[in-house]
Image: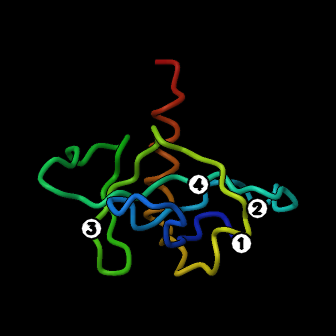
Amino acid sequence: MPQFAIYRNPGRNREIPFVVQIQSNRLERSVGRVVMPLVRRSGSAPPNHQLTPHLHVEGEDVFANPFDLATVPAARLGTAVGVLAERDQDKIIRALDELVSRA
């Protein structure tokens, strides 16, 4: 399960069709995976900002939500539907940097 792998949301929230694994590959022995939800964009979606980057996944317009990070058992994630492109990986890293920045 590589870092930045995309999975269908194993939860029940229909507004979150996917999650992306942000946990480093170095921690693959862990039974859980830290994931960031990818939320459907709608009229109430946040503006395109580096904290909530807009992405396109499996035909869906979504935004990454770093405020709702979660740990999910790896077995619940199932099979990855893809891996984020490098430019989208960079957007996720910038969002996490913005979230924890001291500035």
Q: Which residue is mark 3?
A: 61
Looking at numbered disc 2 in the image, what kind of residue is underneath it? Asn
Looking at numbered disc 4 in the image, what kind of residue is underneath it? Val
Number of on-image labels:
4
User: Considering depth in this image, is 11 or 100 the residue closer to the camera?
Assistant: 11
Asked whether disc 1 touches disc 4, contact meaning CB atoms under 8 Å apart, the reply is no
Q: Which residue is mark 2?
A: 25
CA gap between label 1 and label 4 equals 12 Å
Residue placed farthest to the top in the image?
A: 103
Residue placed farthest to the front in the image?
A: 12
Q: Position of residue 46 (x, y in %)?
A: 22, 44
Q: Position of residue 92 (x, y in %)?
A: 48, 52
Q: Tag 4's secondary structure? A: strand
CA gap between label 1 and label 3 equals 23 Å
Q: Which residue is mark 4?
A: 35
Q: Position of residue 75 (x, y in %)?
A: 73, 70
CA gap between label 1 and label 2 equals 8 Å
Residue sitting at 46 percent across and 43 percent down? 66
Query: Counting residues from the N terminus, which is met first, the one under dot 3 or under dot 2?
Result: 2
CA gap between label 2 and label 4 equals 13 Å
Q: Is residue 29 left or right of residue 9?
A: right
User: Considering depth in this image, is 75 or 49 the residue closer to the camera?
Assistant: 75
Mark carried by residue 1 = 1
Q: Tag 1's secondary structure? A: loop
Looking at numbered disc 3 in the image, what kind of residue is underneath it? Asp
Label 2 vs label 4, nearer the camera = 4
